[in-house]
Image (tube, grey):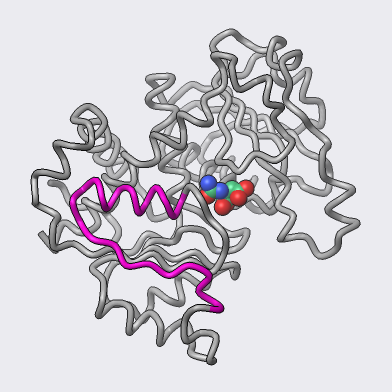
Amino acid sequence: MRKLSFYHLLDANQIQKSDLDCLIKLAQKYRKQGHKKTSRSGKYRSLVLATLFFEPSTRTRFSFESAICRLGGRLIKMEQGSVSSSIKKGESLSDTGRVMSCYADIIAVRHPKAGSVAEFAKYAHVPVINAGDGSNQHPTQSLVDIYTIFCEKNRLDNLKIGIVGDLKYGRTVHSFMNLMSRCYDNNSFTLISSKELRLDDKKKEYFASFGSKISETDNLKEAIKDLDILYVTRTQQERFDSEEEFERNNNLYQINKEIVNQGKKDLVIMHPLPRITEISEEVDQMPQAKYFAQSNYGVYIRMATLAMMTRNHQ
Ligand code: NCD
């Protein structure tokens, strides 16, 4: 197995195209094999994953947990870390990092503060995965997103990608655009949001510096017409300074059947989930809706990520 170019996975910037090629290849192997075969192999039976979550999660935590089980490894976990661990008694994240690395071979951490997982990783002596740090980054969600596009479109270049919703606070958007613009060619982005939730200018300039074309609009109906991918996000209520600011920016876009029918027949609609009101349930039955398939692809790419990041352990 080839070595990845990173030890900890904290930021999408660390991921190279060659890493993506290997991770996708291994995820494909796991997907084709089915789960039962992989868990019987026994190669990972002494591998321990710790999941440390200081923020709510369904897909990220459970797909990591499912991934380690399906690899045949073991799991130790901490939910509601801020009330259930010694952090509640005042222990620092760095001390938690030092100690947890004695108990696990790899650790996935989610925390509400930007940069906190990197701080944790400084003191850990096993690989650490950033499972979301505030509105900053969520690199493994972008692996899920990229693997979904690979499976559904069979290519990662020359795509017209629309991203709608909360582009300011949505960490998945930041990691996804980073990988798509740095590692693949000729992709264009149409960013659809309210003025207040636009992507930060610095990020826009950075992504554009790799040659991606980026345009902005608030008109979803018009924008959807020539897209290959529509990436939908929820308004990140927990990141707003005030309830008024959230209310002003919430519920501005709702993807329904009528809007989807304006787009191409082979449009792929994605969403990292949870979906609140931004996609109506009537869309779920349409062939363009791939967001639940996306959650499923997440298990295989996370199996590949755990396997490759712990390569030295085996
Ligand atoms: C996302 C997250 O936590 O950033 N969810 C996920 O990991 N699947 C998106 C969100 O919460 O809106």
Residue 109, quarter of picture: bottom left
Q: Residue at x 48, y 37 (%)?
A: 180
Let me know if residue 168 is in the magenta part.
no
Q: Is residue 231 visible?
A: yes
Q: Is residue 95 left or right of residue 35?
A: right
Q: Main secondary structure of the magenta part?
A: helix
Q: Is residue 226 left or right of residue 90?
A: right
> Residue 165's spot in the image, x, y percent?
72, 39
Residue 209 higher or lower than 261, as above or below: below
Residue 161, quarter of picture: top right
Q: Is residue 174 visible?
A: no
Farthest bottom residue in view: 90
Q: Is residue 81 left or right of residue 203?
A: left
Residue 289, quarter of picture: top right
Judge by depth and name the residue closer to the eye, 63 or 147. Answer: 63
Q: Give the magenta-colored segment's residue range.
A: 60-83
Total of numbered circles in the picture?
0
Let me know if residue 66 is in the magenta part.
yes
> Residue 167's spot in the image, x, y percent?
69, 45
Q: Residue at x 38, y 67 (%)?
A: 77
Q: Residue at x 37, y 59 (%)?
A: 9
